[in-house]
Amino acid sequence: MNCDFCGKTFDKKSKLQRHYESKTSCISTKDVIKLIYKGEAFFNNKNINCKDILDVQSIVNSSVNSNNFSNNINSNINSNNVTTINININSYDQPDVKGLKLISDLMLSWDQILFKNFQLIYMNRNRPENQSVYIPTHSRNDMKILDGDTIKVMSMNEALKGIENTIIELATNYVEDCKHISESEREERVIKLDNAFDYAMYTRDYSSKPRNISPSLYVQIKKQRKELIRKIRSLLLGNKENIELKKREKEINKKK
């Protein structure tokens, strides 16, 4: 099956869905014409009924805004735990990874791959524009993330779903473009990343053991999920005051 926007081929429906949900590089303004097909439009993970009146120009503008790596937005706060801010921070699902050597080592476990890439992408001191997620307090299991041009409060599980999908998609693209490793090793690394995606999904989105894995493996990856969350929480809480998104939000609150 192929992506309707970029034509990339996937052997699993779950991989195609991850590709759509990651919103990393597939949709651009020039692709707006492709959004409308078979009576429906697919944009930002929403099905738009073409029987409705569609303002094509607004779709183009939305496409431009959603793909800008630098968001310059006027300050505004509403009552739905969503804050619009005037900063230059990338949306959590569109971090700037140009020049970064994303991690897909075959010797690492799936949770280690996700955690190390999380550190590299979202907690990199040299990329403050990617510091788009943080945990407000120790006592809550919520995360604040910059989604497009707004700060949203999400459960940690919900936020990690988008973050993990983005990491796997970016790391997969990086491996597929690597010229310094052999084709066979690239294939092994892509399989490793696919497994990381599957295991993350099994331990995050499933309420019970999936049928296609053994009980012992499920117990193992559940433990790894628990450790992954612990490390991400510890990392974010330990650096909370230095995270760019937190600093900018404090500046806005002082001005109110």
Image: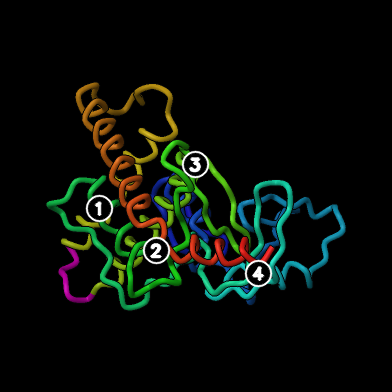
Q: Are marks 4 and 1 in contact (CB under 8 Å)?
A: no
What SS does tag 2 mark?
Answer: helix
Secondary structure state at the residue bearing disc 3: strand
Instruction: Based on the picture, tell me whether residue 81 belongs to the magenta stretch.
Output: no
Q: Amino acid at mark 2?
A: Asn
Name the residue that disc number 3 marks.
142
In the image, what residue occupies the spot 25% across and 72% down?
Answer: 178
Q: Nearer the viewer, mark 3 or mark 2?
A: 2
- Badge 4 local density, few (<14 within 10 Å), some, or many (20+)? some
Residue 29, quarter of picture:
bottom right
Tell me the magenta residue range.
179-184
Q: Residue at x 21, y 30 (%)?
A: 220
Sequence order check, earlier mark of 4 and 3: 4
Q: CA distance from mark 4 to mark 2?
A: 31 Å
Residue bearing mark 1: 113
Q: Nearer the viewer, mark 4 or mark 3?
A: 3
Q: Nearer the viewer, residue 162 or 20?
A: 162
Instruction: Residue under label 4, please give it.
Output: 63
Colour scheme in use = rainbow
In this rendering, is residue 106 above or below 203? Answer: below
Residue drawn 42% across the image and 29% down it: 206
Q: CA distance from mark 2 to mark 1?
A: 24 Å
The amino acid at mark 4 is Ser
> Looking at this rendering, what residue extends furthest in the left direction?
107
Q: Nearer the viewer, mark 2 or mark 1?
A: 2
Mark 2 lies on residue: 242
Please tell me whether residue 181 belongs to the stretch shown in magenta: yes
Compared to residue 186, the image places residue 139 above or below, namely above
Q: Residue at x 16, y 50 (%)?
A: 108
| For marks 4 and 1 on the same chain, the one whose residue lies earlier in the sequence | 4
Disc 3 versus disc 1: distance between alpha carbons? Answer: 23 Å
- Marked residue nearer the N-terminal end (2 or 1): 1
